[in-house]
Image: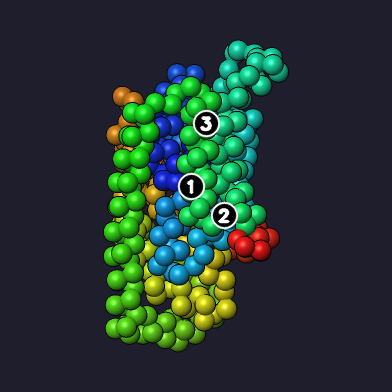
Amino acid sequence: MASSFMTGVTGAACIAMGLIALPAMLKRGYDKRLAIGSVLGPSTLGILIPPSIIMVFIAVVGQMSVGKLFIAGVMPGLLIASLFIGYYAIRGLVQPKACPASPLRYSLREKIAASRGIVLPLFIILAVLGSIFFGIATPTEASAVGAFVCLIAVAIQRRFTWKLLKEAAYEAFKINALCMWITFGAICFSTFYAHAGGTEFISRMLLGLGLGRWGILILIQVLLFALGLFLDNFAVILLIAPVALPVIRALGFDPIWFAILFVINTQIAYISPPFGYNLFYMSGIALPGITLGDIYRAAIVPMIILAIGLALVTIFPEIALWLPRLMIQPGR
């Protein structure tokens, strides 16, 4: 899960943990589907807990605060992470053969020594989110804070080289250029769509269905899930966000809360057959003997856990809205 929190995309976390953790679990005799599912599900958390490229995209299309959206994702992300941890802990107690314990025993000192590796990544996450939450920096400025703290972390580990800095800068330029063109296209599309009357037409149609505000919300969520089965998530955002967000505002729902529901739905799409991206990432790095059918079946439990998380955040909006309301705005 930690790798998910650091990347902002699910593919990198899925591939990294699939290459590192999956072989180790299978070598210890873990159940094949449980091992695959434990990588597939938590790898999606990267787009819910900041940094998140999907959140930036939704904020641009929906004209929302990126900072509030980032902070709103923290508690739902931790909730879903806890659901994953709880499920696999209970599964291990009920079915010890499915995930056998390590025969090795470690002292407290050894465990503390092994946990040193998470200190610097945790410091980077806290520096970025903390600077946004306490109003020290805007999201754009917080990205600079994160880059600076990353440089400090690399220097502490004595891995800093000018070649590394050059490569990191080059990759950052490429990603930013890609994001800017996507953002440009999103703004053009949403502006044209709105001026053509598409937003008003769909809004009136949804509001005229007579389903009530919660019925319309559930209908939108079902539509998001259905589109996520077959379309790229950025395409889903471009198609649905300009239409759904005005309706959500007209119904009196908080758009930040709805955006978090949108992202959780996107998480489900990443691991839902037949075209979930993480399924194919996993297939590309899978060990011999693991078929695409095994991966599809392993995705069922993580999808159920994510659906439970979606239901909880839907029923209890404060899970997503509590932290944004405590935020200190920059300049105050």
**Does dot 3 land on a helix, a strand or a loop?**
helix
**Does dot 1 land on a helix, a strand or a loop?**
helix
Quadrant of the image containing the C terminus: bottom right
CB-based contact (under 8 Å), mark 1 and mark 2: yes
Neighbour tally class for label 1: few under 14, some 14-19, many 20 plus, Cα within 10 Å: some
Rendered position, 314 above or below 275: below
Identify the amino acid type marked 2: Ala
Residue 80 screen position, x and y as percent? 57, 48
CB-based contact (under 8 Å), mark 1 and mark 3: no
Residue placed most toward the observer, 313 or 127: 127
Between the residue at mark 1 and the residue at mark 3, the CA separation in whole angstroms equals 14 Å
Between the residue at mark 1 and the residue at mark 2, the CA separation in whole angstroms equals 9 Å
Rendered position, 301 above or below 332: above
**Does dot 2 land on a helix, a strand or a loop?**
loop
Residue in view at x 60 percent, y 31 percent: 119
In the rendered image, which residue does mark 3 sit on?
153
In the rendered image, which residue does mark 2 sit on?
137
Residue 130 screen position, x and y as percent? 62, 49
Residue in view at x 60 percent, y 50 percent: 131
In the rendered image, which residue does mark 1 sit on?
144
Q: Quadrant of residue 56?
A: bottom left
Identify the amino acid type marked 3: Ala
Residue in view at x 32 percent, y 46 percent: 173
